[in-house]
Image: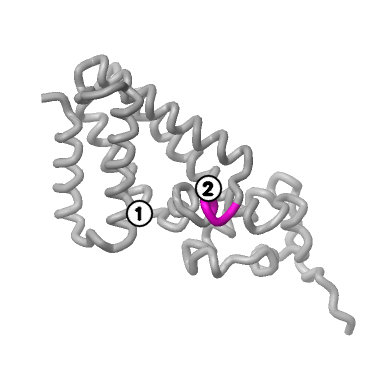
Amino acid sequence: MKHTDTIPTSRSYHHGDLYSSLLETATRMIAEGGTESLSMRKLADRVGVSRTAPYHHFKDKNALLCAIAEQGFERVETFLGEIRAKESSAQLSTLFSEYVHAYIEQAYQNREQYDLMFGREIWRNGTPTASLQKISRQHFKSWLNWIESLCNQGVINAGDSPLRTAQICWATLHGLCRLLNDGIYTEQSSMNQIIDSAVNMMFKS
């Protein structure tokens, strides 16, 4: 029997369904074995489509990884919006602490995706797509707007400009994510105490 690149399957997808399925499956694959375990061919086999099908949605592996990173930014952008929606009914310092704890936990639970969002595989060694650059900038802008609001309301210590304050808080947040994700900090109880101390340092005394 002559080999073709079409895998016999009973599964069929609409255009948008296949895109979602490819992304979801690729995300699971990198969570299981890192980005080195992912290839367009393996992805097609795992989903059960022809080995050319993924290329109708993603030009190459880099574009696929960028799309996974985009989904991560969409998730954290939505989460920030949900936190800010509570501002009228909750103490701002409590909300900020809740956000930092939950953000770091989400980064840990989605470690491989987090590495794509903020790591060198795309930003230094790959080529970030225009849409990934756009959503990453948008998310930092959302963060900056929130920090500026918290500074104006006397919650965050604004020792410098709102931009510089946002950058320092951002670096602290992601430094903690990296130390936890890389296994430097391993005890959850200690990590919670470290996060609380970091948040308290940001608060205006």
| Local secondary structure at mark 1 | helix
> Residue at coordinates 26% horizontally, 23% vertically from top-left?
160
**Magenta includes 114?**
no
* Residue type at the position of mark 2: Ala
Quadrant of residue 46 within the rendered picture? bottom right
Quadrant of residue 166 within the rendered picture? top left
- Image quadrant containing the C terminus: top left
Residue wearing tag 2: 69
> Residue at coordinates 54% horizontally, 68% vertically from top-left?
36
Q: Nearer the viewer, residue 43 or 172?
A: 172
Figure check: 82 above or below 176: above
In the image: residue 158, left or right of residue 139? left
In the image: residue 59, left or right of residue 109? right
Instruction: Specify the segment rendered in magenta.
Output: 122-126
Q: Residue furthest right?
A: 2
Q: Residue furthest bottom?
A: 1
> Residue at coordinates 55% horizontally, 56% vertically from top-left?
125
Image spot of residue 129 (x, y percent): 62, 43
The reply to whether dot 1 and dot 2 touch (C-beta < 8 Å) is no
How is the model colour-coded? one colour
In the rendered structure, which disc, 1 or 2, sits on the residue that comes first in sequence? Answer: 2
Q: Which mark is residue 108?
A: 1
> Residue at coordinates 50% horizontally, 33% vertically from top-left?
137
Mark 2 surroundings within 10 Å by alpha-carbon count, few (fewer than 14), some (14 through 19), many (20 or more)? many
Figure check: 82 above or below 121: above
**Magenta includes 124?**
yes
| Local secondary structure at mark 2 | helix
